[in-house]
Image (tube, rainbow, N blue to C red):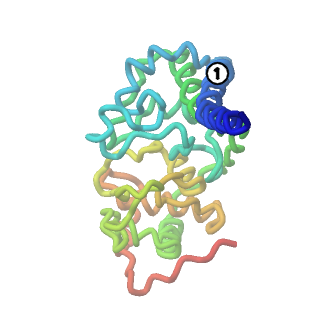
Amino acid sequence: MRTNIREWSLLASAVVLLVSPCVCRAQITEYQQHQWLRMESHIGNLTGHARAAEMDYRRYCVGCHGELGDGNGENAPWVDPKPRDFELAIFKCRSTPTGTLPTDEDLFNSIARGLDRSNMPQWSTFTKQMRADLVAWVKHFSPRWQTEKPGTPIQIPPEPEVTADRIKDGQAVFQKVECWKCHGVTGKANGPSAATLTDDQNRPISAYDFTEGARPKCGDTDQDLYRIFMTGLDGTPMPSFADNIKPDEAWDLVFYLRTLEPQKSKEKEIAKQLGLKPVAPSTAPAAAPPQ
C-alpha cells in the first residue's frame, strides 16, 4: 500500500512538472492580451491604439516582421538587410541616446520615411492615425516598453555657417574618430574594416557609401546627420560619438561629409577651392578614448 502511494505521489509530481510550463505560458499569453495589447502611442495630439493596428500590420508588415514581430516573416530569408526584430526593441533611427528606447515620434517618422536601401518602403500613404496605431502595435511586441521609458531626445544646437575652416576641422574629426576605417578615405564604404562589419546578431552589414548619393537611412538633412553621430545606430557597428566629440565638432563633421557626396553643395565647392585631399590612413591618429 505504501509503495502504491509513493508511486502515485511520484506520478502526480511528474504531471505537475509537465503541466506547469503550460500554465505559465497561458498566463503570459493572457497578460499580453489584456495588458500589452492595451499599449498606446502619443504623437502630438494623436493617440495610437495597438488593437486598432492589427489588420494593417497583417496586411503590410507581417510578411517581413512576422506574426510575433521577431523579424522572421515569410519574406525574411530573401530580405537584406534583415527586418527589424521588434521583440528586442533596438532601433537604428532615434532621437534618444544610445541604448535607450526611441520616442513614439521617432517610430512614427520611421514608418513614413522608410529606410533607403532596404525593403522598408515609405508608408507615407498611411494616415497619421494609422501610423500612430502601428507605433503602438510595434511597441506591444517587447517587454521593454512595460518597464522602460524612452530616452530624453538629444538637443541639437543651431547649425553654424559653413566655412572653409569648419570643413578642414571636420576632416580632422573624420580622422580622429576613424570614420575612414569603415567608410573609406573618400566615403566609398571601402575602408579596411568594411568587409568585416556585422550587426548585433552577427549578420554581415555594409557601411554607408557617401558617394552613391543615396539618402541616409535615418534622414538626409544636416540635423539628421548630426543626430546620427550623437545617438549612433543601435544594433549596428555605428556608435554614438556623444562622448568623443563636441557639438561644434559634430557640425564640422557634417560639413566635411557633405564634400564626399556627388551632389552639388556649398561644402563641395569650398572643398574644391581648398584643394582638399582625402585623409591618409597611415597617419590617421587613433580614436580618442571615451571621456
Q: Is residue 41 visible?
A: no
Depth check, front residue: 213 or 13: 13
Q: Give the farthest residue toward the bottom.
A: 283
Q: Position of residue 27 (x, y in %)?
A: 66, 26
Q: Position of residue 199 (x, y in %)?
A: 43, 56
Give above or below for 254 relative to 76.
below
Q: Residue at x 65, y 31 (%)?
A: 24
| Residue 229 in the image, given as x and y percentages of width and height | 55, 57
The residue that mark 1 highlights is 30
Q: Quadrant of the C terminus?
A: bottom right
Q: Classify mark 1: helix, strand or loop.
A: helix
Q: Position of residue 59 (x, y in %)?
A: 38, 18
In the depicted structure, whether residue 257 falls above or below residue 60: below
Q: In the drawing, does residue 4 fall left or right of residue 210?
A: right
Asked whether residue 195 appears in the rendered view, the answer is: yes
Question: In the rendered structure, which amino acid carries the disc numbered 1?
Answer: Glu
Q: Residue at x 33, y 63 (%)?
A: 189
Q: Quadrant of residue 31?
A: top right
User: Viewer-proximal residue, 111 or 216?
Assistant: 111
Q: Residue at x 64, y 21 (%)?
A: 30
Answer left or right for 46 relative to 138: right
Q: Quadrant of residue 215?
A: top left
Q: Is 189 situated left or right of 66 in this image?
A: left
Return the residue found at the far front. Answer: 1
